[in-house]
């Protein structure tokens, strides 16, 4: 295999964090075995990356670009996050634009299409993606999740409409990438054709780490343990799981293990208390050590994924790699990972009570049908073994080599 010189823009890239940072790290760390990489990333990642490579060989050239944040403004109006992020992308381009000693450049993440960066301006082959963020906030949840979500989602959809129809840099980036656009899920793949007439390759930005895959060998027990993990923000909708679990027969012994923290933490804890299930809910908070997460997941039998807006649900692949079937809404990235053999998908409704009831029915079904749950668990492991990061790198390498040939 020809060793290429590749320039990668990976704003989020960190060996100790999840989500987008995990995507950036898993791809870059593995690609470095085959190619010479120059990486543009946020300066906030420097300490962790330096710590990881302490006394280890490192053949990646990391370029840390500082980003000026407007923390107070972002708390008041979260979408203002993109203003400083756009400035960061411009600084990253200026940092590298005069260096033309590359075979390929890759705009890797963040995956949101509203900010494509500027690498497409460099006169070398350009690959863009995995791309996400083309979907609108689901109409089923706009009117039934409170006034804040109503205002936020309505504004989000207006901004999304403007991005998809009037943002020229996105169109330039997609045009430059041409056939080398990677879609983060099937919804995005369809919308790229609808809005931009672009045919893309499906490249789910989640994969299993083969190091944590193993057969589950649990002692027989009556208690069923559920796992829920993620940021404690409104769109993650832990409240749906809590209300759904409160409807389960009190004779059934269950526990809910919750990781993460955020602005909704206290409200969700109070809701658990109000529903009289707080003794069955274990809130771990923020996990400082990433290795602690698999230890918690291993205790559990089923993953509850209640997010109502998620293009790249990395946590689903992480739980599947430890044999946990998932209960989720039939939306966005989740619907590409979960099927009837690996969990239960729920059709979202405009009626929130119906959403809660359907989630509860799915929970009761998976509790009662133990053999079905074990079958799903086995299928999750099979799926995870077919979708490791190493296998994704092989696919990405094929794309790179084809770009150079053409």
Image (tube, helix red, strand yellow):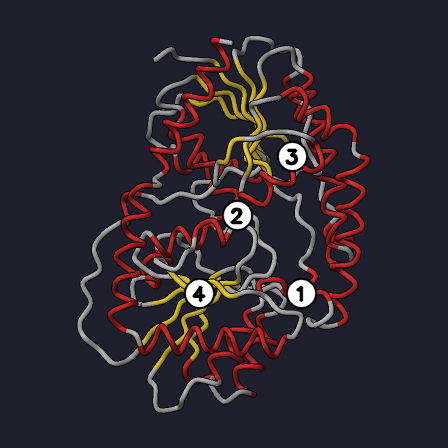
Q: x, y percentage for residue 83?
A: 76, 41
Which of discs 2 and 4 lies nearer the camera? The answer is 4
Quick one: label 3 or label 4, which is nearer the N terminus? 3
Q: Residues under labels 3 and 2: Cα distance?
A: 19 Å
Quick one: label 3 or label 2, which is nearer the N terminus? 3
Element type where label 4 sits in the image? strand
Q: What residue does disc 3 label?
A: 193
Q: Which residue is drawn at 34% across and 25% down?
A: 57
Q: What residue does disc 4 label?
A: 327
User: In terms of image quadrants, where is residue 170?
Assistant: top right
Q: Residues under labels 3 and 4: Cα distance?
A: 30 Å
Q: x, y percentage for residue 153?
A: 74, 59
Quick one: label 2 or label 4, which is nearer the N terminus? 2
Q: In the image shown, does 272 or 330 lie closer to the viewer?
A: 330
Looking at the rendered structure, the number of numbered marks drawn on it comes to 4
Q: What residue does disc 2 label?
A: 312
Q: In the image shown, does 71 or 369 lie closer to the viewer?
A: 369
Element type where label 3 sits in the image? helix
Quick one: label 1 or label 4, which is nearer the N terminus? 1
Q: Residues under labels 2 and 1: Cα distance?
A: 20 Å
Q: What residue does disc 1 label?
A: 140
Q: x, y percentage for residue 359?
A: 49, 73
Element type where label 1 sits in the image? helix
């Amino acid at each position: 295999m020809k060793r290429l010189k590749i320039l990668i823009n990976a704003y989020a890239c960190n060996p100790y964090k999840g989500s987008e940072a995990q995507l950036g790290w898993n791809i870059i760390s593995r690609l470095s075995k085959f190619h010479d990489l120059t990486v543009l990333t946020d300066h906030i990642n420097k300490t962790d990356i330096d710590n990881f490579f302490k006394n280890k060989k490192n053949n990646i050239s990391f370029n840390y670009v500082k980003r000026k944040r407007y923390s107070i403004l972002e708390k008041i109006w979260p979408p203002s996050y993109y203003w400083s992020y756009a400035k960061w992308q411009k600084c990253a381009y200026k940092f590298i634009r005069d260096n033309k000693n590359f075979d390929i450049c890759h705009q890797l993440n963040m995956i949101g299409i509203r900010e494509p960066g500027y690498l497409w301006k460099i006169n070398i082959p350009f690959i863009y993606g995995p791309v996400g963020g083309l979907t609108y906030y689901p109409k089923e949840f706009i009117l039934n999740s409170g006034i804040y979500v109503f205002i936020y989602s309505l504004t989000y959809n207006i901004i999304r409409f403007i991005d998809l129809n009037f943002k020229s840099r996105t169109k330039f980036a997609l045009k430059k990438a041409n056939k080398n656009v990677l879609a983060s899920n099937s919804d995005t793949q369809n919308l790229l054709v609808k809005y931009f007439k672009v045919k893309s390759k499906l490249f789910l930005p989640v994969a299993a780490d083969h190091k944590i895959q193993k057969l589950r060998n649990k002692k027989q027990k009556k208690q069923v343990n559920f796992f829920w993990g993620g940021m404690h923000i409104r769109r993650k909708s832990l409240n749906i799981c809590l209300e759904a679990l409160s409807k389960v027969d009190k004779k059934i012994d269950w526990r809910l293990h919750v990781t993460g923290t955020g602005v909704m933490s206290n409200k969700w804890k109070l809701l658990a208390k109000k529903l009289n299930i707080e003794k069955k809910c274990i809130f771990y908070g923020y996990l400082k050590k990433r290795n602690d997460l698999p230890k918690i997941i291993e205790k559990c039998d089923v993953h509850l994924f209640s997010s109502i807006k998620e293009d790249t649900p990395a946590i689903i692949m992480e739980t599947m790699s430890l044999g946990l079937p998932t209960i989720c809404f039939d939306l966005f990235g989740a619907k590409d990972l979960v099927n009837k053999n690996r969990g239960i998908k729920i059709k979202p409704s405009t009626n929130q009570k119906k959403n809660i009831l359907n989630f509860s029915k799915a929970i009761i079904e998976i509790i009662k049908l133990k053999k079905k749950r074990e079958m799903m668990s086995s299928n999750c492991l099979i799926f995870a073994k077919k979708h490791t990061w190493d296998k994704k790198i092989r696919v990405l390498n094929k794309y790179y080599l084809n770009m150079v040939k053409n």
